[in-house]
Amino acid sequence: MRIVLLLFMIALVVAVVLGVMLVARTRSATPLSPPADDPREILKRRYAAGEIDEDEYLRRMSGLSQDW
């Protein structure tokens, strides 16, 4: 009887660990950042690379945030 109880406890622990791993994997698969082709992300990369200066960055970012 003890062996059955021990095997049940081991199976329960394994099931919980696998469940946690599955939830963690599905949550990490969802993108938290905007897509790389988002205009704001492109603008941020260009500013970080030094292709545009701060004034140009702020002007264009302001234009992107306006509702037309």
Image (cartoon, rainbow, N blue to C red):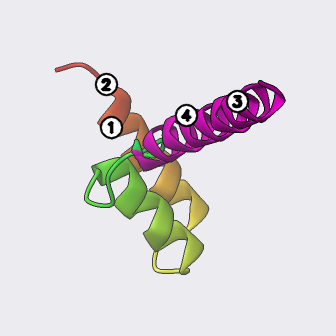
Q: Residue at x 77, y 24 (%)?
A: 1
Q: Earlier in the sequence, mark 1 or mark 4?
A: 4
Q: Secondary structure at mark 3?
A: helix
Residue 1 numbered mark, or none:
none
The secondary element bearing badge 2 is classed as loop
Q: Which residue is mark 1?
A: 63
Residue at the left extreme?
68
Among the two numbered marks 4 and 3 on one chain, the one whose residue lies closer to the N terminus: 3
Secondary structure mostly seen in magenta is helix
Q: Residues within 10 Å of mark 2 (few under 14, many from 20)?
A: few
Q: Which mark is residue 4?
A: 3
Tell me the mark number nearer the camera, choosing from 2 and 4.
Answer: 4
Q: Would you call the spot at circle 1 few (<14 residues within 10 Å), some (14-19), or many (20 or more)?
A: few
Question: Which region shows up in magenta?
Answer: 1-29
Packing grade of label 4 (10 A; few <14, some 14-19, many >=20) is few
The amino acid type found where label 3 is placed reads Val
For label 3, the crowd category at 10 Å Cα-Cα, with few meaning under 14, some 14 to 19 and many 20 or more, is few
| Residue 19 numbered mark, or none | 4
Q: Which residue is mark 2?
A: 66
